[in-house]
Structure formats: C-alpha cells, structure tokens
Image (tube, rainbow, N blue to C red):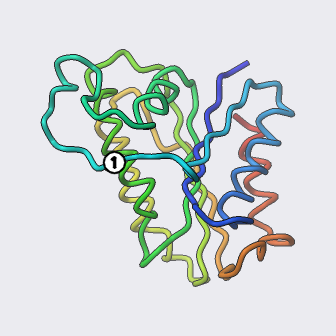
Amino acid sequence: MKKVLVISSSLRLRSNSEALADEFIRGAAEAGNEVEKITLKDKEIHFCKGCLNCQKTQKCVIKDDAPAIVEKMHDADEIAFATPIYYYEMCGQLKTLLDRANPLYPSDYRFRDIYMLTSAAENEEYVPERAVAGLTGWIDCFEKARLAGTVFAGGVGGPGETESHPALKQAYEMGKAV
C-alpha cells in the first residue's frame, strides 16, 4: 500500500481537471492505496519571497496554508497534480504551490512518482506540453523523483464537460496502476 496525495488546483466548481483527479483517486483507492485529496480551492497560498530561509530550516517563513500542504507532499509516496491549462501552462495556483514547496529540496522527501492530470478547452496534443515541462522542471530538482505519467483531457472548456471524455478512464487506470 502506498500513500498517495492528489492535489487539485482548479478553483472552479465541477472542474474538468478535478474530475480527472477524482478518477485517479478512485483507481488508486481501489488498488488498495491510502489516498488523500487536497484542493487548493479556499486555500490561502502566498507567493514565495525568495528568502531561501527554508533551505536552512526546512520551514517556510510565510504563515498560510502552503506549509501544511508541503508537509503532506513530503510524506507522500506518490503525488498527482491536477490543473486546468490556462494560456498553455499550468494554472497559477499550482505554480505558486510548487514554488512554495522549496523546503522539500534539502529534505529527505519520500515521494518518487509524480503524475500530472490536465484539461483544456483546446484539443491539440501539444496543448499540455508547457505545463508538463513546468512540472518536469520542478521534478528535476528532486533526484529521487520522476514524472511517472500524464493524462490530458482536451476539448473541455465548460464545467463538467469531461463527463464522457476518454481521459477519465485513462486517469482511473493510471491511478489503479499506482
């Protein structure tokens, strides 16, 4: 049994990327894993100040919701990030959280496999490339971690448009294989 953390970064109700997250969770739970979902909706996450104090203390000086999330990231075996694609990139909430995860860099973090679940109104295969590249840049800073898989639901602009999208099954199967 693995400890799986899923972070959903969309702020919209009935979010398409969150639907992917929920299917990933369903698969991972059915496979017997301990799964926790965190949604960034209603979380207070401020921008990193770049003070690098966290590199010495492994604690962030900013008092908001990010340190508790980063602690859960530290203790997870696997992490899945779900994000809508805005302007061909991950949403700002997720990027801000990744920046705030800087205390993990010098730590003995537990995570190894990282997954990315994305959705966008555009349907072309290249649409998630920059978002995946952004996450890969973050992963590259953690030598024990790797990008283990991605799922993209394209052509879904409005809330709930993933209801019959084949990416839901892909997210479920990916979660089940964790």
Q: Please state which of residues 93 and 29 is positioned toward the viewer in this rendering.
A: 93
Which quarter shows the C terminus? top right
From this view, report whether residue 3 is shown above or below residue 52. Answer: above
What x and y, as percent, mark residue 76? Answer: 55, 25
Residue 153, horizontal then vertical, whole percent: 67, 70
Q: Residue 142 lies in what quarter of the image?
A: top left
Question: Which residue is depicted at the point 43% across and 31% down?
Answer: 70
Q: Is residue 85 above or below residue 28?
A: below
Residue 116 horizontal side relative to residue 2, left or right: left
Outermost left residue: 51
Which residue bears the numbered disc 1?
46
Label 1 crowd (10 A; few <14 / some 14-19 / many >=20): some
Decide: is 126 above or below 135. below
Question: Where's the N terminus, which quadrant?
Answer: top right
Counting from the top left corner in percent of width and height, residue 163 is at: 84, 70
Quadrant of the image occupied by residue 83: bottom right
Picture layout, residue 114 above or below residue 78: below
Number of marks in the rendered image: 1
**Going 81% across and 41% down the picture, which residue do you hit?**
27
- The residue that appears at 48% across and 20% down in the rendered structure is 110
Q: Nearer the viewer, residue 159 or 24?
A: 159
Horizontally, is 159 left or right of 12 in the view? right
Amino acid type at circle 1 is: His
Left or right of 152: which side holds 90?
Answer: left
- Callout 1 secondary element: loop
Residue 100 image offset from top left, x and y in percent: 33, 40
